């Protein structure tokens, strides 16, 4: 079955540390890729998305992600995290042969220590 | 502007009872999705509506689950004869179109089946 994996379930960082959250998917066809974030007490909201073109995409709040087709990966990065980045992060993939729904990874809880 | 709204925000029910969950999508969004998030897990797709097309029900876990949508507006997810394993947060999302369009999520309904 097609799936999305986020290998880090919990990440704890100090402020100003660099962040990289892994996301891998299992589908060889065309994909649309998303990262969503859920801040404490808030709705899921879109951080960034990739459909085509430049595989390095930039999103809100200084986040970026790189699509590496050969590795089936779409890792999320931020050079210097802030306490306000404490949240749960979800990678989601729309796989071309699976209709219009998103397949989500299990999420990564990030805690940034002040 | 108004986002996706869901009601109730919390629902506690007894095993065997039926429940109805409501979703009001963003005005003008033709696509509407229902997802479920069990504790500590990612989101699971349940059902998808697009305009007047037949819904994609491929994610519904059993025939106890059903959903309806009135035109391009409100949707209701019904769970009959609830079981304890139905306890989860039920999330609704809407989008302008399909596939690569951003899905905007509501706050969810937290369902607890005793």
Image (tube, grey):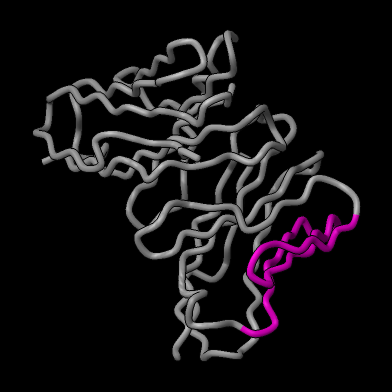
Left or right, residue A53 beside residue A83 = right
Residue B40 pos. (x, y %): 37, 58
Say which quadrant the C terminus of chain A sits in: bottom left
- Is B58 rendered above or below residue A106? above
- Seen from the viewer's position, the closer of residues A16 and A1 is A16
In the picture, residue A36 is in which quadrant? bottom right
Residue B50 pos. (x, y %): 59, 18
- Is A66 rendered above or below residue A45? below
Residue in the picture at 42% in, 26% down? B60
Q: Residue furthest right?
A: A53
Residue in the picture at 49% in, 20% down? B57
Residue B97 pos. (x, y %): 67, 27
Left or right, residue A83 beside residue A96 = left
- Seen from the viewer's position, the closer of residues A91 and B41 is A91
- Is B107 rendered above or below residue A12? above
Residue A35 pos. (x, y %): 62, 56
- Seen from the viewer's position, the closer of residues A55 and B82 is A55
Left or right, residue B111 beside residue A25 = left
Magenta residue check for A13: no
Which residues, given as a range, are shown in magenta?
A: A54-80
């Amino acid at each position: 079955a097609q799936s999305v994996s986020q290998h880090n379930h919990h990440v704890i960082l100090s402020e100003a540390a660099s962040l990289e959250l892994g996301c891998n998917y299992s589908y060889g066809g065309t994909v649309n890729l998303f990262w969503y974030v859920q801040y404490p007490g808030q709705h899921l909201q879109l951080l960034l998305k990739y459909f085509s073109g430049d595989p390095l995409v930039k999103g809100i709040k200084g986040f970026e992600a790189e699509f590496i087709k050969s590795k089936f990966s779409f890792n999320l990065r931020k050079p210097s995290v802030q306490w306000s980045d404490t949240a749960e992060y979800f990678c989601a993939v729309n796989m071309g042969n699976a209709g219009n729904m998103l397949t989500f990874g299990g999420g990564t809880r990030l805690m940034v220590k002040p | 502007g108004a986002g996706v709204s869901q009601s109730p925000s919390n629902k506690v029910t007894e095993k065997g009872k039926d429940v109805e969950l409501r979703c009001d999508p963003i005005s003008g969004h033709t696509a509407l999705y229902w997802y479920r998030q069990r504790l500590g897990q990612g989101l699971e797709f349940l059902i998808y509506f697009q305009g007047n097309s037949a819904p994609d029900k491929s994610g519904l876990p059993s025939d106890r689950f059903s959903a309806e949508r009135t035109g391009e507006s409100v949707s209701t997810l019904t769970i009959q004869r609830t079981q304890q394993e139905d306890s989860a947060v039920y999330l609704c999302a809407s989008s302008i179109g399909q596939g690569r369009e951003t899905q905007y999520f509501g706050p969810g309904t937290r369902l607890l089946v005793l």
